[in-house]
Image (spheres, coloured by chain):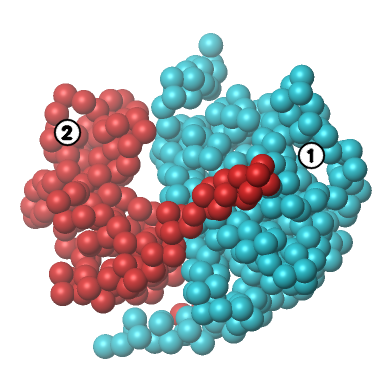
Chain colours: A cyan, B red
Amino acid sequence: MTEDAGRLAAFDARIAAGEKIEPGDWMPDEYRRQLIRMISQHAHSEVVGMLPEGGWITMAPSLRRKLVLLAKVQDEAGHGQYLYHAAETLGVSREEMLEALLQGKAKYSSIFNYPATSWADMGVIGWFVDGAAILNQTMLARCSYGPYARAMIRICAEESFHYKQGMEIVLTLSQGTPAQRTMVQDAVRRWWWPTLMMFGPHDAESPNTPTLVRWGIKTRTNDELRQEFVNQTVPDAHTMGLSLPDPELRFDAASGNWRFGEIDWDEFWRVVHGDGPCNRERLEARRAAHDDGLWVRQALEAYAART
Amino acid sequence: MSDTQWPRYEVFQQETPDRPHRHAGSVHAPDAEIALLNGRDVFVRRPECSSLWVAPAGAISRATAEEITGGALEMDSTTGEAVDYLVFAKLDARGMLTHLGQVRATSKVQALQEAARACGPQTPFVLWVVPAAQLTRSEPDQAEPLFAPALDKPYRDQAFYHIQTALRRLRQEAGD
């Protein structure tokens, strides 16, 4: 047995025993590569994820809603930082990750390339998008790489608040005036399919999944998580009198699952490859934020350099 | 300095005064004072902090269980003046790097050796030693301005919302 094969066997055994891999431990190059890819994309998603909601802070309908939305967007900034830290422990620098994002070379969750066009979107994003993210992140909190798992534990605890504040908005609007009910129903219609796309391609089309499952990075597949999301969301929608835009949606008593129609994968790949409703706008906003923050960085450096 | 990445600082967080500091993550900052402020903003948006410590990532010496048992810490010929190092160890497979105490040593490698011995018969999964002189602590009189604002924001806690109660009530109304 070569040295690497021996190390790989020991590595696989550690993961099978439920041990966490820590920075400095030997790991296969492919394990490191997959983690850097996933964690940096996850970090970018938190950072870009601030943008659809950030624009609504000053238009929140009450001071309470404004404080809550501000707190949620601050959390997302913090989550991006936790994740950049976790990626840095694998040997990639924060600077190169930020540079890749600003240059449009980095991927982030496509959901944030859709526009938030009404106040009801603030509710539905929390209910759908954060609800979907929590399912994925609860899985990743058990991931085999220590720094990623610990970042996820922190994030999941905070994200429950994101989900519930969104649900509270949806509940309020769904029991409100006819105009409010129309507004929230329209938001549900627009966000449903993009949210189902968040879980990624079908298992059969997801080349990375078997490797990620084998190394304990993911413990569940895209399709499993997507099905759980549909199962938990459909009954709540019905309770609130909201309909979901899928004529094929029906309960399958034999499996206990809600069956749903096929996702528009052409749309999914279009948005992934840069041609979504807001891809350009999001990148421009991110670049402007970076440029506008230059004076703050310069001021902090001047302060640190004082004698 | 041009507009590039600042040095990285590791951040250690104490949740309540009776508990040890634990590693929270890292921030980038131009100096330790700003690192403390960034650490507060990134890691303390909720009321679970009584003290923060930061140390430049480059000043920390680290060893994994493999390095400790594999003898990577054995060859040390350097000697200097004895200084204090803070010891952080991850002793539980699923745990976090936790402050254990302090050792005095004449080099980083000796500090790691002393720290490994201080962990007792168990080999830590991860071991860090931080020169005490390189550590910056939030001052006790800063605790209120740094950490009290999080107390005023109960709406950051998921328990502030009563969604399941509201959904149950709707289901009951529909059933009536």
The chain ID associated with circle 2 is B
**Residue at 9 percent of width and 48 percent of height:** B104
- Residue A283 visible somewhere in the drawing: no
Query: In the image, is residue A1 above or below residue A147?
Result: above
Q: A162 or A152, which is in the foreground?
A: A162
On the image, the x and y values in percent for residue B67 come to 32, 32
**Residue at 67 percent of width and 62 percent of height:** A175
For the residue labelled by badge 1, is the local secondary structure a helix, a strand or a loop? loop
The chain ID associated with circle 1 is A
Q: Is residue B130 left or right of residue A4?
A: left
Instruction: Give the labeled residue for mark 1.
Output: A201
Q: A37 or A199, which is in the foreground?
A: A199
* Image-quadrant location for residue B109: top left
Do the residues at discs 1 and 2 belong to one chain?
no
Query: In the image, is residue B91 above or below residue A173?
Result: above
User: In the displayed image of the protein, which residue is found farthest to the top?
Assistant: A1
Instruction: Give the labeled residue for mark 2.
Output: B119
User: In the displayed image of the protein, which residue is found farthest to the front?
Assistant: B176
Q: B7 or A101, which is in the foreground?
A: A101
Q: A22 or A227, which is in the foreground?
A: A227
On the image, the x and y values in percent for residue B52 come to 26, 62
> Disc 2 marks which amino acid?
Cys
Q: Is residue B57 left or right of residue A297?
A: left
| Mark 1 Cα-neighbour bin, 10 Å: few <14, some 14–19, many ≥20 | some
Marker disc for residue B171 = none
* Image-quadrant location for residue A248: top right
Q: How many marks?
A: 2
Q: Is residue B12 left or right of residue A85?
A: left
**Residue at 8 percent of width and 52 percent of height:** B82
